[in-house]
Structures are given as structure tokens and as C-alpha cells.
């Protein structure tokens, strides 16, 4: 696997996916837990990635 990284490339701007209120609540809870446990940290980067939820067989996300 190779990955070409171009220094100075402009970030791609794309509108975020719409989320149902229950998904938005779950996202906030999961992000808060990851932040509190030190797995993630706040960022001001212009780069980002969309968030997609996939429901498990038991109905949880």
C-alpha cells in the first residue's frame, strides 16, 4: 500500500452528513468518552472526515 502525500494541498470542503437526533446524541457521548479517556484531543485542523454509524445486530451503534 502506498500513500502519496502532497504538502501544501488544500483541504477538500464537504458538508457533513445529516444525523438523526439519536445519532447526534450518541456521537457526542462517544466523543466525550474518548476525550475523557485521552484517546482523542481537540483539533482545529481544516481537514476532517465524515462520521457514519452502522447499527449492530443488537440495535446498538
Image (cartoon, helix red, strand yellow):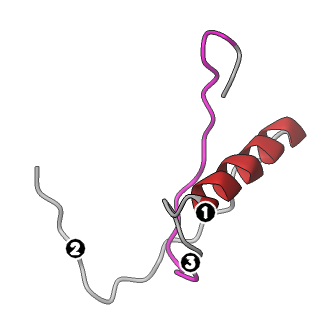
Residue of label 3: 43
How packed mark 2 is, by other alpha carbons closer than 10 Å (few <14, some 14-19, many 20 or more), is: few
How packed mark 1 is, by other alpha carbons closer than 10 Å (few <14, some 14-19, many 20 or more), is: few
Residue of label 2: 5
Find the magenta span and give its range: 44-58
Instruction: Report the quarter where the C terminus lies.
Output: top right
Q: Would residue 43 be counted in the magenta stretch?
A: no
Please give left or right for residue 7 compared with residue 26 in the image: left
Earlier along the polypeptide chain: callout 3 or callout 1? 1
Give the residue at x 61% y 10%: 57
- Distance from disc 1 to disc 2, alpha carbons, whole Å, reads 28 Å
Earlier along the polypeptide chain: callout 3 or callout 2? 2
Q: Position of residue 49 (x, y in %)?
A: 52, 59
Q: Nearer the viewer, mark 3 or mark 2?
A: 3
Give above or below for 12 relative to 46: above
How packed mark 3 is, by other alpha carbons closer than 10 Å (few <14, some 14-19, many 20 or more), is: few
Q: Which mark is residue 55?
A: none
Give the residue at x 78% y 39%: 23
Give the residue at x 52% y 64%: 38
- Distance from disc 3 to disc 2, alpha carbons, whole Å, reads 20 Å
Please give left or right for residue 28 compared with residue 4 in the image: right
Observer-nearest residue: 35 or 59? 35
* SS assignment at label 3: loop
- Distance from disc 3 to disc 1, alpha carbons, whole Å, reads 11 Å
Q: Position of residue 24 (x, y in %)?
A: 80, 47
Would you say the residues marked 3 and 1 are in contact, meaning their CB atoms lie under 8 Å apart? no
Q: Position of residue 42 (x, y in %)?
A: 59, 75
* SS assignment at label 2: loop
Residue of label 1: 35
Amino acid at each position: 500500500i502506498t500513500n502519496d502525500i502532497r504538502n501544501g494541498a488544500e483541504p477538500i470542503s464537504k458538508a457533513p452528513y445529516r444525523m438523526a437526533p439519536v445519532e447526534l446524541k450518541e456521537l457526542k457521548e462517544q466523543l466525550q468518552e474518548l476525550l475523557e479517556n485521552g484517546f482523542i484531543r481537540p483539533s482545529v485542523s481544516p481537514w476532517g472526515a465524515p462520521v457514519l454509524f452502522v447499527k449492530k445486530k443488537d440495535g446498538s451503534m
